[in-house]
Image (tube, rainbow, N blue to C red):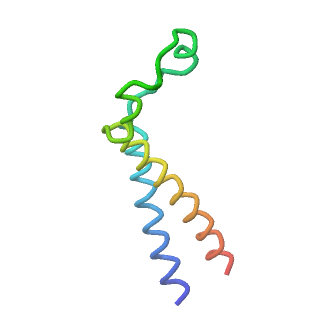
């Protein structure tokens, strides 16, 4: 029984790994670090307030979700393989 659960979690883990790699690869590079502080870029414009609705915002959110799933499944696999 535990072997079946191990294999199912391992397959899901591999799928999450592939999704995480693809999402991290297709994301746009964010070069707006300290330069916004120096140039005084406004954070209250329309784009900044609706950034989560754009394609880039959704990609970042999905990347964070898949990263969290990656960590949770890694811990679950380590527990399952010790048993």
Front residue of this view, candidates 73 and 53? 53
Quarter of the picture containing the C terminus is: bottom right
Left or right for 65, reference 46: right
Toward the front, the furthest residue is: 44
Front residue of this view, candidates 25 and 41? 41
Toward the right, the furthest residue is: 82
- Position of residue 76 relative to residue 19, above or below, is below
Which residue is located at x 40 percent, y 53 percent? 18
Q: Give x and y (percent) for residue 37.
A: 57, 15
Q: Give x and y (percent) for residue 75.
A: 63, 65
Which residue is located at x 45 percent, y 76 percent? 8
Left or right for 23, reference 9: left
- Position of residue 30 relative to residue 17, above or below, is above
Q: Give x and y (percent) for residue 73.
A: 55, 65
Which residue is located at x 49 percent, y 21 percent? 32
Which residue is located at x 48 percent, y 16 percent? 41
Place residue 68 in its image quadrant.
Answer: bottom right
Q: Give x and y (percent) for residue 9.
A: 49, 72
Place residue 12 in its image quadrant.
Answer: bottom left
Q: How many marks?
A: 0
């Amino acid at each position: 029984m535990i072997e079946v659960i191990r294999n199912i979690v391992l397959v899901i883990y591999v799928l999450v790994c592939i999704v995480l790699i693809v999402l991290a690869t297709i994301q746009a590079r964010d070069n707006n670090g300290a330069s916004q502080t120096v140039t005084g870029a406004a954070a209250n414009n329309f784009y900044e307030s609706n950034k989560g609705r754009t394609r880039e915002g959704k990609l970042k959110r999905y990347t964070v979700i898949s990263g969290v799933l990656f960590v949770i499944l890694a811990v679950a696999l380590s527990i399952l393989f010790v048993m």
